[in-house]
Image (cartoon, rainbow, N blue to C red):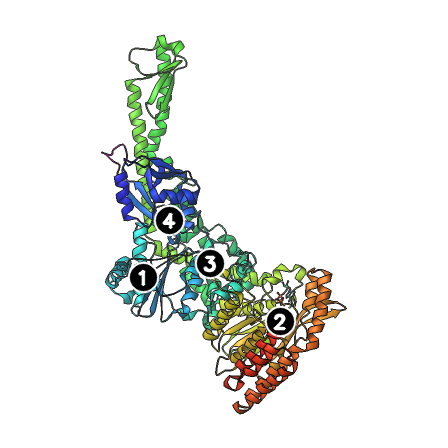
Amino acid sequence: MMKQYMETKSQYQDCILFYRLGDFYEMFFEDALTASRELEITLTGKNCGQEERAPMCGVPYHAVEGYLNRLVAKGYKVAICEQVEDPKQAKGIVKREVVRIVTPGTNLDTQALDETKNNYIMCIVYIADRYGVSIADISTGDYFVTELPDGSRLMDEIYKFSPSEIICNEAFYMSGMDLDTMKEKLGITIYSLDSWYFDDAMCREKLLEHFKVSSFAGLGLEDYDCGVISAGALLTYLLETQKNSLSNLTHLTPYVTGKYMMLDSSTRRNLELCETLREKQKRGSLLWVLDKTRTAMGARTLRKFVEQPLIDKNEINRRLDAVEELKEQAISREEIREYLSPVYDLERLITKITYGSANPRDLTAFKSSLEMLPPIRYILEEMKVPLLQEIYEDLDALEDLCDLVTKAIREEPPIAMKEGNIIREGYNEEVDKLRRAKSDGKDWLAKLEEDEREKTGIKNLKIKYNKVFGYYLEVTNSYKDLVPDYYTRKQTLANAERYITPELKELEDMILGAEDKLYALEYELYSEVRETIAAQVERIQKTAKAVAGLDVFTSLALVAERNHYVRPKINEKGIIDIKEGRHPVVEKMIPNDMFISNDTYLDDKKNRISIITGPNMAGKSTYMRQTALIALMAQVGCFVPAQSANIGLSDRIFTRVGASDDLASGQSTFMVEMTEVANILRNATSKSLLILDEIGRGTSTFDGLSIAWAVVEYISDSKLLGAKTLFATHYHELTELEGKIENVNNYCIAVKEKGDDIVFLRKIVKGGADKSYGIQVAKLAGVPDLVINRAKEIVEELSDEDITSRVSEIAAREHTAKKKGRSKKYDEVDIAQMSLFDTVKDDDVLNELKEIDVTNLTPIDALNTLYRLQNKLKNRW
Ligand SMILES: Nc1ncnc2c1ncn2[C@@H]1O[C@H](COP(=O)(O)OP(=O)(O)OP(=O)(O)O)[C@@H](O)[C@H]1O
């Protein structure tokens, strides 16, 4: 047996091998050490002829799923090795085979899967500077492919799909991508496969064979190269691990990343689209507000909508039309939702059916779901907008399949096949006959028992059954003397004897024969029904998609009505004009409709950048995120929380919000901040929307301010970037940019001062804030009075020095100098330098200052150096 084990294990070295031994799956050697540690199960040993016992541990087969899921969730691959012949029939060692390999991205166990999320596996190939990316969810039949000309959108794709597992070629694995972060932060299992998986000819052949087509034109993949290799390698891997034909992967859908809004990982996190930043929970996210879907398919589709906002005006309007009609047709909508409630997860059900793992209850769940479809179709028929009409067309009520299950399967069948009693009466004559024989058998037995009692006078004679002896007659010791000769004794108990008779044996053969036949026939008929349904997988998947879409639109319509959202207008002129906008999530968290709405106006001309100042806690972040969320919701095709909204399409939204430490990957807060800023400035376009919250706050005031200043200049300049931006800052100096740069405008969030305290008005108004009110906020937060009072003293001392106003003056002059032309700029910097000389009394700094030759530096570098020195001084104070 150990020899057989070793042979099997050698073929599955990268997996933990679950080796079936009777009622247990056993693991040996390294696998046993790993599994006992990860699953906290006892490690024992097995004698296998060597001096040392082999480490061994095991899990009972009936509880295997739980253990398996725990290992897979931790990123392990598990190969299930089953006994494939009846141990009783086996000559020698029982034959065993690996029947399935379970990996994080291919786990099909519904207990382990979140029904509202897809479980994706992604394959990335990197060939000749291009990336082929394919994605599949074998639990639902999703299978996509795309090609990327460079790596700039790759991370976005990874974050968008958040696969549980990535397989790739060696070239990608070694390409210097930050795989460790992906592994640690997203918990993705990533590994490279052997090079033969990516053999061009094999990949192509595998795909053509699977889709039963002769050319790639039939699949719409004629222009794909490394995409085809990626999809082919993924298919090969899946076929190998699942060891079935994957007949639920019916389509390989090519998609173009440019059709969707680009959102990088930090923007997805910062905007809390599907989960909150801190707790990583759905509650508190945008999806939490929008998701009123009734089916698992709908929930998954809505998540995809939110993860992939559109950028095509017509597509967005088509969705908005659907939401609008369903919002207006409230009665029909609620009826549809009623009918959707009992609909099971058709996508995952059909997967189980095609994989042959659906049990009889799955079929009745399938049927009861189909029963809801005709009334839904009936309501949909009345709908006018094209998208709902298309859903109506695609939504095949599958009446033939519903009829089949109704006729063939009993109303409440047992879960397990072996319990029998699955096929409905009247479906098959032979089944009915055998059932009759079985139940008649019971009568015959009762009659025989009666006859024997009379014949022998044994009043308490009973016919009983057990697995070892079959049917027997039981006679208690008190009647032993009356037992006739034709009884053959089979067993003696303490106070009874058990016998059989030729007549009883004959009856037994008839009854048990009928039972065996019945079981075999029921199984055959059941499998036939299952296969008939499986053959219709494409029709069912199409219907499932239609139901999911309908569920999403009814959910969005309901949310729009309940939350008083409006239909956004979509424009291509780059204007974002929101009247009385609200934050969709924060407004839900604040009691009694106390959320204060605010306007936003941005365009490509005079209103490109809004500098937003205001005290801490005033609501700057909330305001900026609400603008981003409203724009994003509009592009999802969803109504928005506002009185009115005209949304110019954004190709990308970028956010840089707050300080997020990334110490685990060895980056400081400021480094993370600057990496994100660099990413934004490099990847944003003039059609992007940027949300920048306190850029530069992670470093010294003067460095921070100058960076913030330079960033605003860069963004505002249409020759450099020219993107619409909301920029919140505590550097009041930046408000001086209004008037200096044409398209920069100041806004602040109003507060009212009441003595030492402040009242937050949460209203955005034109103009800049003059103060930070940091100390007041600290007081509100409960910082001890001693500290607060001391802080006030220090603030006064500092403002005596007037450092900040001096620096802003220098910066402003520098800016003017720059605008006037290059010749003048050094004068201004000189003034800055001179003004510093006045204040400096520290010899070291003074010497350093004298040595700087600003004429060799760009103005912004020169200023930076000066600021740094000033900061040094400040720190000495
Ligand atoms: N428009 C609003 N109406 C009602 N309450 C609001 C509004 N905006 C923000 N708030 C409340 O104020 C809190 C603070 O808001 P926010 O975090 O946006 O402030 P901030 O100005 O960005 O603060 P900081 O500068 O300290 O980061 C929010 O958690 C929310 O509860």
In-image side of 70 versus 864 (left or right): left
Asked if one can make out residue 726 in the rendered structure from this viewpoint, the answer is yes
Whether residues under marks 1 and 4 lie with C-beta atoms below 8 angstroms apart, the answer is no
Question: Quick one: label 4, few (<14), some, or many (20+) residues within 10 Å?
Answer: many
Q: Which residue is mark 1?
A: 170
Asked if one can make out residue 575 in the rendered structure from this viewpoint, the answer is no
Question: Quick one: label 3, few (<14), some, or many (20+) residues within 10 Å?
Answer: few
Please identify the quarter of the rendering in which residue 171 is found.
bottom left
SS at mark 2 in the image: helix
* Amino acid at dot 3: Lys
In-image side of 510 versus 188 (left or right): left
Q: Which mark is residue 875?
A: 2
Whether residues under marks 3 and 1 lie with C-beta atoms below 8 angstroms apart, the answer is no
Q: CA distance from mark 3 to mark 1?
A: 22 Å
Q: Which residue is mark 4?
A: 352
Q: Tell me the magenta residue range.
A: 86-95
Of callouts 2 and 3, the N-terminal one: 3
Q: Which residue ends up furthest to the bottom in the rendered image?
A: 823
* Amino acid at dot 2: Asn
Of callouts 1 and 2, the N-terminal one: 1
SS at mark 4 in the image: helix
Q: Which mark is residue 185?
A: 3
Ligand 1 picture quarter: bottom right
Rendered view: 498 above or below 561: above
Secondary structure character of the magenta stretch overall = loop
Residue 593: image x %, image y %? 66, 62
* Amino acid at dot 4: Lys
